[in-house]
Image: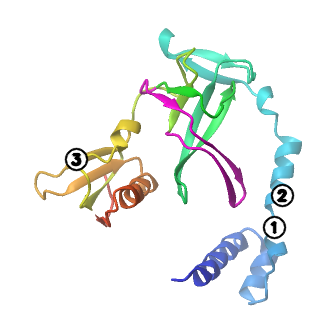
Amino acid sequence: MDMEALEVEKRRELIEAVSEVDDQLAEAFLGDEPISPADLQGVQPLLDGVLNYLPCPIEVSSYALDQTKNEEKVELTGSLDGPLVALAFKLEEGRFGQLTYLRIYEGVIRKGEFIINVNTGKKIKVPRLVRMHSDEIEVRFWIYRDTFTDGSVKYTMTSMNVPEPVMSLAVQPVSKDSGGQKEDPTFRVGLDPESGQTIISGMGELHLDIYVERIRREYKVDATVGKPHVN
């Protein structure tokens, strides 16, 4: 499918979804009337509402779990002068590879500095940062997920218990060591003793899709992927 056809298809899906909650748009959609970009605008009013009605981040109490004190709760002030405490909450595959969205609860993160993955103890240098602007990206940052600090504290934003994977699928062929397990404890690679297939397991279809795409991109392997199944 070419990009123009894909754009037309996705725009129709968007209009159909919005029509379910907008009677005026639904009427125009069902009547095959032209729908302009202005008819779909809603992001700016949403952002205005966030600014006008929701509290400032430093006005909301946030707590970390101190791993040196049996996960005792520690209130985070949101101060720029405090120790860095940041949570990587979302992975995304893009034209720059795997990106991770990071929320900073306290402190500051800078390019070139080292930060610590509290869950694994791994020290990582910040080579670049990314700032999101709608559909544009300023390349500045690339890092893995979990809770990160500057090393002066051992806080996590969630418990350090690693959940068991909930979904698996067969991939063939695939490198025996894709590197994923070293950075993401919720991603597993194993071998089915009956079929001899390589099985990857994770926290859902999106999680597995990300790693399949990494296998194809980083190892230049056009992997054959089976149907996912719930563990």
**Gap in angstroms between the C-alphas marked 3 and 1:** 46 Å
Amino acid under disc 3: Gly
**Color encoding of the figure:** rainbow
Earlier-in-chain disc, 2 versus 3: 2
Which residue shows up at 23% across the image and 49% down it? 176
Bin the neighbour count of mark 3 within 10 Å (Cα to Cα): few under 14, some 14-19, many 20 and up. few
SS for dot 1: loop
Q: Which one is nearer the viewer's eye here, 187 or 152?
A: 152
Bin the neighbour count of mark 1 within 10 Å (Cα to Cα): few under 14, some 14-19, many 20 and up. few
In terms of image quadrants, where is residue 55? top right
Q: Which one is nearer the viewer's eye here, 4 or 24?
A: 4
For label 1, the residue is 41
SS for dot 3: strand
Decide: is 226 above or below 146: below
Asked if one can make out residue 157 in the rendered structure from this viewpoint, the answer is no
Amino acid under disc 1: Gln
For label 2, the residue is 44
Q: Are marks 1 and 2 in contact (CB under 8 Å)?
A: yes
Rendered location of residue 198, percent (x, y) = 22, 54
Q: Seen in the image, is 28 located left or right of residue 184?
A: right
Image mark for residue 190: 3
Q: Which residues are magenta?
A: 119-144
In terms of image quadrants, where is residue 90? top right
Amino acid under disc 2: Gln
**Gap in angstroms between the C-alphas marked 1 and 2:** 7 Å
Asked if one can make out residue 67 in the rendered structure from this viewpoint, the answer is yes
Image mark for residue 77: none
